[in-house]
Amino acid sequence: CILLMLFHTIVTCVLIRISPFEFWKKTLSTFIIAITTASSSAAFADNIKTCTEKLGVSQRLANFGVPFGQILYKPGVSVLFWFAAVSVAESNSVEVSVVWFVTAVVICIILSAVAPPVPGGMTASFTILFTQLGLPQADLAVILSLTSILDFVVTGTNIYTGQCVLAITSRSIEKETK
């Protein structure tokens, strides 16, 4: 998740021409809400405010992009699902073929979009992931206990990367309309 956030920070700061520290300062309040509550829904109002007042995203774009992004754009969840699947497969000597790998990536992306944006919302998704990839259900308890802790970091990552995408999109729209 840290690498994902760093990648988004670098790309965003280069494209919208802002210092990483200035960008982090502008997005910090929403990130703190997200990382302390593990709920993107709890960070929703502050996310809209941060995007419009601090990042210069139009109200119209923020009103569409924030809810859409918080529901469907969850790269942190995708990464968590994928690492959990690969780790469990490796620890249980499950054969990881190219087909298994591609299937895992597709399932992780789809499940990240349908996981509810509330603490513990990924529980059912992990069960589906393990079943579809032929992973032992016994390891599900371990993953779910770790997920309750990692959910905080993942939520912060999802909110932050969503803000990065909206800032880039807003700047792109501004350039096209000039």
Image (spheres, helix red, strand yellow):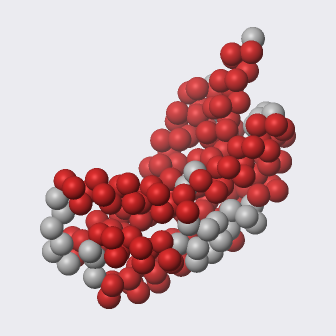
Q: Nearer the viewer, residue 10 or 110?
A: 110
Q: In which quarter of the image is residue 63?
A: top right
Image coordinates of residue 71 in percent, x first then y, are: 64, 57
Q: Is residue 83 above or below residue 11?
A: below
The residue shown at (41%, 65%) is 81
Residue 102 coordinates in the image, percent (x, y): 28, 53
User: In this figure, what is the number of numbered marks?
Assistant: 0
**In percent of the image, x 71 and y 43: which residue is there?**
65
Assign the C terminus to one quadrant of the image.
Answer: top right
Residue 78 visible? The answer is: no
* Residue 52, percent from left and from top: 82, 40
Instruction: Judge from the rendering whether residue 107 lies leftward or rightward of residue 101; answer left or right.
Output: right
**Percent of width and height locating residue 15:** 58, 26
Give residue 20's quadrant in the image: top right
| Residue 12 in view, yes or no | yes
* Residue 170 against residue 110 in the figure, above or below: above
Q: Along the horizontal axis of the image, is 128 left or right of 171?
A: left
x 76%, y 58%: residue: 44
Q: Which of 14 and 107 is in front in this view?
A: 107
Residue at the location (32% across, 60% down)? 104
